[in-house]
Amino acid sequence: MPLTRISLRKGKSPEYCQTLMEQIYLALRETFDVPDEDRFVTISEHGSEHFDFSANYLGIQRTDDLVIIQITANNTRTVEKKRALYAKIVERLVASLGMRPQDVLISIVEVAKENWSFGNGEAQYAPAV
Amino acid sequence: MPLTRISLRKGKSPEYCQTLMEQIYLALRETFDVPDEDRFVTISEHGSEHFDFSANYLGIQRTDDLVIIQITANNTRTVEKKRALYAKIVERLVASLGMRPQDVLISIVEVAKENWSFGNGEAQYAPAV
Amino acid sequence: MPLTRISLRKGKSPEYCQTLMEQIYLALRETFDVPDEDRFVTISEHGSEHFDFSANYLGIQRTDDLVIIQITANNTRTVEKKRALYAKIVERLVASLGMRPQDVLISIVEVAKENWSFGNGEAQYAPAV
């Protein structure tokens, strides 16, 4: 159920992008109780004129390699699980892509379980009636 | 007020895209109490290296024709209305575009009424003061 | 912390886009208690076949210069602050880019403070433990 949208600067290779999507999925599996095969991720590339970010907000030094990751997910996770997700995403992106930890920005948007349809026009997660 | 963002693989014709946007609008009209002319929809195309999805999550067989539809709307609808919306979107996309019901993924993000400005810098839906 | 996503029709100059992103950031600073340097904004361009909007919903006359601005922010602002933000964004875009007030649509999505990581895999805004 998480639907993940990634925004980054133009110019990364297809291999880089595929690894990025895969590693975020794996981090969600490990920390956010996401079931096997629950993976839905998109990437949008932006030129510099369409991608504005602070290079030092909160004292964190960001570069053009910044990835902005917005995850829409059910409103069922504790603060501790969110902390674990952030740490795991960064750990995985550092290990697999050599990313700088400063270059990973994550935003979670939470929704009710009945706010999803995964196909067939049904609300697979809605409470039974 | 619904703001609808659609993500799909590159390669669909302009006619396909226009029908897709129109049919989702009509489904919102029919099931979600959306007023006449309240239509705001964008489509983002993605290459395969920027669009990752599960081909079988929840036992639903998806193809490269998958459309991911994220709708931001007021937090005023019941679970029953959400079920009706999902079913109607799929019904319309099957009938108009021959889509497979399995290839329609829908995500709803809910917000408060005062979270919209439809122009002129005013909060048209906010409670009167 | 606001993460701002702008959608507009293709064809605006880089200077236009940079001014747009800058002016929205300044409006957030002035009305939404946004700290210095807290700026994260993306723009997505769309052809006409991927950008559907009502030219007259609520009696507001929109043109192809419409910008759709979706801001993800903490759920800490009053209705009055939201009204002030809408007015300030429009005031600034009219003054700096000559935009029509009717061509500015704004949507706010609210989240909890612990839903952000601004780098390093940490939840910088989460309550202390």
Image (cartoon, coloured by chain):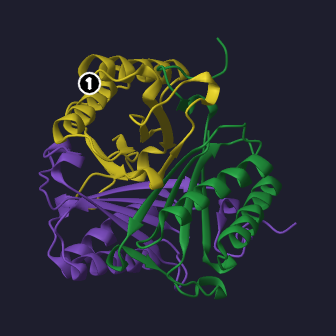
Chain colours: A green, B yellow, C purple
Which residue is at 50% across, 41% downward? B110
Where does residue B59 sit, x and y in percent of width and height? 62, 23
Which secondary structure, mark 1? Answer: helix
Which residue is at 44% across, 28% downward? B103
Nearer the observer, A117 or C69: A117
Nearer the observer, B117 or C12: C12
Q: Amino acid at mark 1?
A: Leu
**Numbered marks: total:** 1
Q: Residue A111's quadrant in the figure?
A: top right
Is any part of residue A78 visible from this angle?
no
Q: Residue B58's quadrant in the figure?
A: top right
B3 w.r.t. C20: above or below = above
Where does residue C16 sit, x and y in percent of width and height? 22, 78
**Crowding near the residue tagged with mark 1, few <14, some 14–19, many ≥20 C-alpha atoms within 10 Å:** some
Which residue is at 36% across, 40% downward? B2
Q: Dividing the image into 4 quarters, which one contains the N terminus of chain A?
A: top right
Which residue is at 61% across, 60% downward? A19
Is any part of residue A22 visible from this angle?
yes
**Left or right: C57 as drawn, with respect to C109:** left
Q: Which residue is mark 1?
A: B97
Q: Dividing the image into 4 quarters, which one contains the C terminus of chain A?
A: top right
Where does residue B11 sit, x and y in percent of width and height? 28, 44
Q: Chain of mark 1?
A: B
Residue occupying the far top of the picture: A129
C109 w.r.t. B65: above or below = below
**Left or right: A92 as drawn, with respect to A1:** right
**Left or right: B83 as drawn, with respect to A73:** left
